[in-house]
Amino acid sequence: MNLATWLLAMVQPLIGRILASLGFSIVTITGMQIAVNAVRDQFIAGVNSLPADMLNVFLLSGGGVGFGMVMGAVTTRVVIWQIQSSTRILGVNPG
């Protein structure tokens, strides 16, 4: 057996797993971005429909900052889950 053939046989499953996990991460991040933007737009539409005085109280009390913190926490949790899933895909031995 040729050395190049042997090396290719050893590395090919690893390359496939790496490309699969990278594709999975791109799909997850893109889907998460769309979902976060949709939730943010609905929240902004709901807040903008408040009467002016209630909107001022909401913004003065830090409602916008709190919503930003919640969305940041959700996004961070999804990214951590995605990293754990990709390392699980990369760590599985096919043979």
Image (cartoon, rainbow, N blue to C red):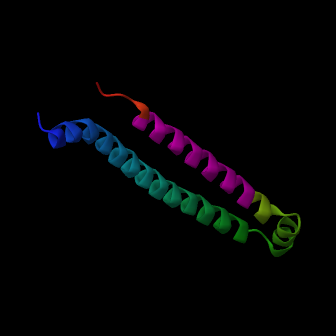
Considering every residue shown, the one lying at the far top of the view is 95
Residue 91 as seen in the image, left or right of residue 83: left
Q: Residue at x 88, y 69 (%)?
A: 60
Q: Residue at x 56, y 49 (%)?
A: 79
Find residue 44 and report its horizontal and vertical position in percent.
66, 67
Residue 65 as seen in the image, left or right of residue 57: left
Q: Residue at x 52, y 44 (%)?
A: 83
Q: Is residue 81 magenta?
A: yes
Find residue 55 and report its horizontal and vertical position in percent.
81, 70
Q: Residue at x 39, y 30 (%)?
A: 92
Q: Is residue 48 above or below residue 84?
A: below
Q: Is residue 76 magenta?
A: yes
Q: Is residue 86 above or below residue 30?
A: above
Question: Which range of residues does the magenta coloring cover?
Answer: 68-90
Relative depth, front residue between 47 and 67: 67
Quarter of the image with the N terminus is top left
Relative depth, front residue between 79 and 56: 79
Q: Is residue 43 above or below residue 82?
A: below
